Image: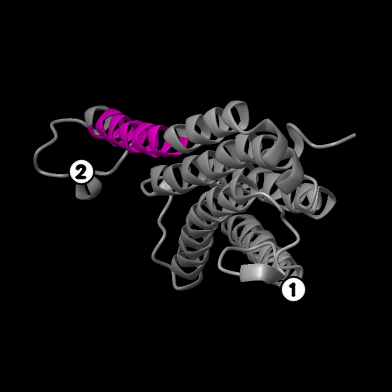
């Protein structure tokens, strides 16, 4: 994909070099994000082996069907981001803006449903610092809910960032600040970030909600 000289940073000699550096930088950033969540997943797995009965008690109270529907929302948003990249290659501004808005709406739906789930868990006394009102009888089960809240909350923050990026790109298109094909790589980077958020949830959902769940 050719890039006009006006979009070539002065420390790059060619557009191909600039594009390669952009991809390398983005993949390095995504790798750091994966390492961060990888540590969380290792902690969860270790805790499961160390306290299987307590984890089973906590997991048995989680609303896995609601989280499963939320997974569908997030994955559909990822499909929309792929369609954004495809539309950018066709230089179809209308479809780019449409799919960005749909992806952002699905991301907001994910966050809204997750907020509803948190409220539900709060009313049931599952979230931390609920004292004697918690239905969880084992201290280790309550600690697992701390891990659950940290993991899903951190992931929710990443979803929020992805939504803001999608809305920002849609606004740039609306006001004519997204010129193609020069800025198509920006949309690809946003798409890669959204896919990262999806990949993280694909691992978090079964690890937190399904594994060890009582039959």
Between 198 and 35, the one lying in front of the other is 35
Examine the rendering and report whether any part of residue 149 can be seen: yes
Give the x, y percent position of residue 87.
Answer: 60, 46
Q: Please provide the residue range marked out in magenta.
A: 18-37
| The N terminus, quarter of image | top left
Q: Residue at x 33, y 38 (%)?
A: 29
In magenta segment, residue 26: yes
Left or right of 138 on screen, residue 63: right
Q: Residue at x 81, y 55 (%)?
A: 66
| The C terminus, quarter of image | top right
Between 41 and 165, the one lying in front of the other is 41
The residue labelled by disc 2 is: 8
In three-dimensional space, the C-alpha distance between marks 1 and 2, rounded to whole angstroms, equals 55 Å
Give the x, y percent position of residue 109.
Answer: 70, 65
The residue labelled by disc 1 is: 123
Up-down relation of residue 142 to residue 101 (above or below)? above
Left or right of 2 on screen, residue 133: right
Examine the rendering and report whether any part of residue 1 can be seen: no
Mark 2 secondary-structure assignment = loop
Q: Residue at x 49, y 34 (%)?
A: 43
Q: Residues within 10 Å of mark 2 (few under 14, many from 20)?
A: some
Mark 1 secondary-structure assignment = helix
Up-down relation of residue 36 to residue 106 (above or below)? above
Q: Residue at x 68, y 40 (%)?
A: 55
Residue pushed farthest left?
11
User: Of discs 1 and 2, which sits in the foreground?
Assistant: 1
Between 8 and 191, the one lying in front of the other is 191
């Amino acid at each position: 994909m050719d890039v006009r000289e006006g979009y070539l940073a002065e420390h790059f000699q060619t557009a191909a070099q600039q594009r390669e550096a952009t991809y390398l930088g983005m993949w390095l950033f995504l790798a750091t994000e994966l390492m961060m969540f990888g540590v969380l997943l290792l902690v969860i797995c270790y805790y499961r082996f160390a306290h299987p009965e307590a984890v089973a008690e906590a997991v048995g109270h989680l609303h896995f069907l609601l989280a499963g529907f939320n997974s569908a929302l997030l994955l559909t948003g990822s499909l929309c981001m792929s369609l954004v990249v495809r539309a950018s290659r066709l230089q179809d501004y209308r479809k780019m803006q449409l799919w960005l808005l749909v992806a952002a709406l699905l991301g907001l739906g994910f966050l809204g449903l997750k907020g509803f789930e948190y409220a539900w868990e709060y009313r049931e006394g599952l979230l931390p610092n609920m004292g004697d009102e918690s239905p969880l009888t084992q201290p280790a089960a309550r600690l697992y809910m701390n891990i659950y809240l940290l993991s899903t909350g951190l992931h929710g923050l990443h979803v929020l960032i992805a939504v803001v990026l999608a809305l920002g790109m849609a606004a740039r298109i609306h006001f004519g600040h997204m010129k193609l094909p020069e800025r198509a790589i920006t949309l690809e980077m946003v798409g890669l970030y959204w896919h990262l958020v999806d990949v993280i949830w694909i691992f978090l959902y079964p690890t937190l909600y399904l594994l060890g769940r009582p039959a």
